[in-house]
């Protein structure tokens, strides 16, 4: 499974309530897969994105989220694998916190 990085500047965005109009196609060992972009967020000077595959991928659980870093220059958007385990854990924790905050806000409304 690949993981990638994003570029600083972005504010945290969670797109769970929106239709997944923004998608990106990943080229994995198992072939191409279209993914919905469900969140983007900065962490420690880098930008990250959470992707949800829109079709099953061999070797992944259903609804398993893929986390990548990314950089953006103009219209160019490049995903970057997160290869460091500590970095990946921090990114996963930050994404989980976003989900927890969203769930808590939903309970308040």
Image: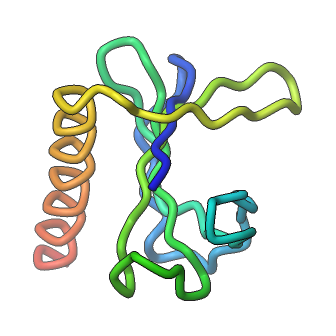
- In the image, residue 25 sits, relative to residue 45, either above or below, namely below
- The picture places residue 33, in percent across and down from the top left corner, at 69, 72
Quarter of the view holding residue 71? top right
Residue at coordinates 58% horizontally, 61% vertically from top-left?
Answer: 37
Q: Answer left or right for 32 relative to 50.
A: right
Q: Answer left or right for 26 relative to 81.
A: right
Residue at coordinates 49% horizontally, 63% vertically from top-left?
Answer: 38
Quarter of the view holding residue 99? bottom left
Q: How is the image coloured?
A: rainbow
Q: Answer left or right for 62 relative to 22.
A: left
Could you tell me how many numbered marks the image carries?
Answer: 0
From the image, which quarter does the N terminus lie in?
bottom left
- The picture places residue 25, in percent across and down from the top left corner, at 75, 62
From the image, which quarter does the C terminus lie in?
bottom left
- The picture places residue 45, in percent across and down from the top left corner, at 39, 12
Quarter of the view holding residue 43? top left
- In the image, residue 102 sits, relative to residue 68, either above or below, namely below
Outermost residue toward the front in this view? 29
- In the image, residue 57 sits, relative to residue 82, either above or below, namely below
Pick whichever, 76 or 107, lies toward us.
Answer: 76
- The picture places residue 65, in percent across and down from the top left corner, at 38, 65
Outermost residue toward the right in this view? 75
Pick whichever, 54 or 101, lies toward us.
Answer: 54
Residue at coordinates 88% horizontally, 32% vertically from top-left?
Answer: 75
Outermost residue toward the top in this view? 45
Residue at coordinates 17% horizontally, 57% vertically from top-left?
Answer: 101
- In the image, residue 37 sits, relative to residue 98, either above or below, namely below
């Amino acid at each position: 499974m690949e993981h990638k990085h994003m570029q600083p500047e972005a504010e945290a965005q969670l797109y769970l309530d929106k239709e997944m109009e923004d998608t990106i196609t990943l080229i994995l060992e198992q072939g191409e897969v279209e993914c919905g972009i469900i969140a983007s967020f900065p962490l420690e000077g880098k930008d990250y994105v959470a992707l949800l595959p829109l079709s099953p991928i061999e070797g992944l659980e259903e609804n398993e989220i893929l986390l990548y870093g990314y950089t953006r220059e103009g219209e160019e958007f490049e995903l970057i694998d997160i290869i460091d385990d500590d970095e990946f854990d921090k990114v996963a924790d930050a994404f989980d916190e976003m989900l927890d905050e969203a769930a808590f806000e939903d309970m308040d409304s």
